[in-house]
Image (tube, grey):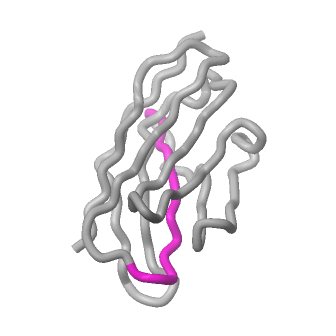
Amino acid sequence: QVQLVESGGGLVQAGGSLRLSCAASGSIFTGVVWGWYRQAPGKQRELVATIISGASTTYADSVKGRFTISRDNAKNTMYLQMNSLKPEDTAVYYCNAHSRYTSFNSWGQGTQVTVSS
C-alpha cells in the first residue's frame, strides 16, 4: 500500500515562493503518473501539474512559467516549486500517484497554501 504525505504549505505574500513536497512510502512501480492538484473553497479540484518517468511534465495554463514539478527517485519524493505566487493560487494542494495500466490511485491528505495580497 502506498502512502503519500505532503508538506511545505503555508502563508506567503503575493510574489513569494513556496516548495511543496510529497513523500511516498511503499512499493512504487513503473507506469505511475505523479501529479499535484489543488482545490480552492467552493471550487472543484483541478490539475496543477504532472510528471511521468521523472521527465515528461505538463502544467495547467494558469501556472505555466511559475511552477515547476520534479521528482527525486532516490528519495521517492515529488516536489512543486511555486514562484511568483498570486492570491488566486490559494487552495489546498494534494499530491496524487496513479497507474496508467492498473486501478492504483493514491492521494495525500493535502496541504494548505494561502497567498495574501
Report the label total. 0
Stretch of the chain drawn in magenta: 29-41
> Which quadrant holds residue 51?
bottom right
Q: Percent from the top left, x then y, of residue 27?
A: 29, 76
**Residue at horizontal 41%, vertical 31%?**
9
Q: Percent from the top left, x then y, of residue 35?
A: 52, 59
63 vs 48: above or below: above
- Left or right for 47, reference 5: right
**Residue at horizontal 47%, vertical 54%?**
78
102 vs 87: above or below: below
Q: Going by the picture, which residue comes out furthest to the left?
A: 1
Q: Percent from the top left, x then y, of residue 87?
A: 60, 21
32 vs 55: above or below: below
- Left or right for 68, reference 98: right
**Helix, strand or loop for the magenta stretch, by majority:** strand
Q: Going by the picture, which residue comes out furthest to the bottom?
A: 101
Report if residue 91 lies within the magenta region.
Answer: no
Q: Percent from the top left, x then y, of residue 39?
A: 47, 42
> Which quadrant holds residue 49?
bottom right
> Which quadrant holds residue 93?
top left
